[in-house]
Image (cartoon, rainbow, N blue to C red):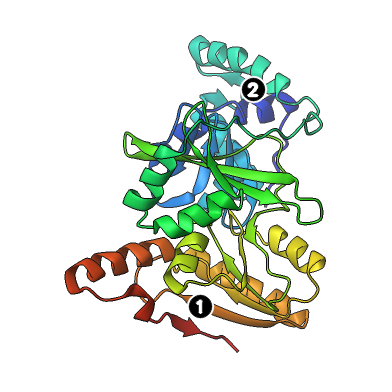
Amino acid sequence: MYNIRFTDEELMIAKSIDLVDIAKHSGYTPVPKSQRYHTLKEDNYVMIKDRRLWYQNSNNTHGDQIGFLREFCGMDFQTAVQSLLEYAGYQKDKEKFINEELEKRFRENKKEIIANRKEPKPRGEFILPAENDDFRRLYAYLIKERCLSKKIVDWFVKEGLIYEEKKHHNIVFIGIDDKDGSAKFASMRGTSDYLGYTFKGDVENNDKTYCFHVLNKNSADVKVFEAAIDLMSYMDLKNDFKSNKIALGMLDDQPLERFLQENPHVKTITVMVDNDVHGRKAAVKIRKKYKNDGYKVKVRFPQKEKDWNDYKKYLVSKNQENHVDTRNHHTKAVTWR
């Protein structure tokens, strides 16, 4: 294949293009989630930040405009850059833009691109958001919207693992360092919808190797969930206060690695992530990795619905119709050997 050489400025032009526009042009459907963030309708694990960078939480990958075309459109590096230059209205053979307006737009974006090249700042201090005077919205959201029992919400509040923050009334889910009880990680979820979107995000400067979890030193089993509310839902469904449980908060297994290192008494891992394409891929990856490390690994999905909270809501709905105790419903266990 003929090798095309690109100048530094041409690469900068390629990286100056609005990534949301590129996604649309490539056949994807960006969905605005806030002023700074978009997801893709076709894959909501993909997040576009500030219209310039993308992150794929399902496999912990990220990149710029060039990387997007390579990852999601199957292009090689040279084809991706050439496509971006053409989209920007830049003629490679003449080394100039086709009109002054396009060139002006690039020059305006160039300053921001250069500024973003600065060395990343060291992680700042991790500070939990201020706590609200009451947890009224937290209880309303988790009980009414997520169908959790007051008993389970009370338990997590009493343990200091969740609270309602003061400024926006988000629920804060805390990841504790079990050695000294200090908070190392925290994620947040909104208690109300805005234009059909519920806010989700992490507290700044957290350590993602820690996670929201429930520890029991007397249990040799750890159940691994994707989200904090799924963990709470399963615990509520099964009245399970005995086993260890962790919520990855993503599909990367760094929190599981740390948990196992700090808890060598754990010998069995039960993977209970979402029953969708990304969850199943993650389950295969986790099972293979930790089975090779000598752990007994099981994979379990809810009998119905995509995740454990959806399953909890389904059973609550059926319970209201049929007056059936949800704890009598069994989950579907799938063990891959």
Amino acid on which disc 1 is placed: Arg
Left or right placement of residue 50 versus residue 61 in this view:
left
Disc 1 to disc 2: CB gap under 8 Å: no
Say above or below: 307 vs 110: below
Q: Residues within 10 Å of mark 2 (few under 14, many from 20)?
A: few
Going by the picture, which residue comes out furthest to the bottom?
A: 337
Does the rendering let one see residue 184?
yes
Circle 2 sits in a helix, a strand or a loop, which is it? loop
Say above or below: 173 vs 291: above
- Reading the image, the residue beneath label 2 is 95
For the point 55% across and 69% down, the residue is 281
Q: Quadrant of the C terminus?
A: bottom right
Q: Quadrant of residue 315?
A: bottom left
Between 144 and 332, the one lying in front of the other is: 144
Residue 297: percent from left, percent from top = 64, 81
Between 52 and 92, the one lying in front of the other is: 52
Amino acid on which disc 2 is placed: Glu
Task: Point out the tag, 1 or 2, that comes first from the N-terminus.
Answer: 2
Does the rendering let one see residue 27?
no
Residue 233: percent from left, percent from top = 45, 63
Q: Quadrant of residue 216?
A: bottom right
Q: Residues within 10 Å of mark 1 (few under 14, many from 20)?
A: many
What separation in Å lies between label 1 and label 2 (alpha carbons)? 57 Å
Left or right placement of residue 230 versus residue 215 in this view:
left
Between 270 and 238, the one lying in front of the other is: 238
Q: Quadrant of residue 113?
A: top right
Residue 103: percent from left, percent from top = 56, 14
Residue 191: percent from left, percent from top = 41, 39
Say above or below: 86 vs 299: above
- Reading the image, the residue beneath label 1 is 300
For the point 68% across and 47% down, the residue is 2
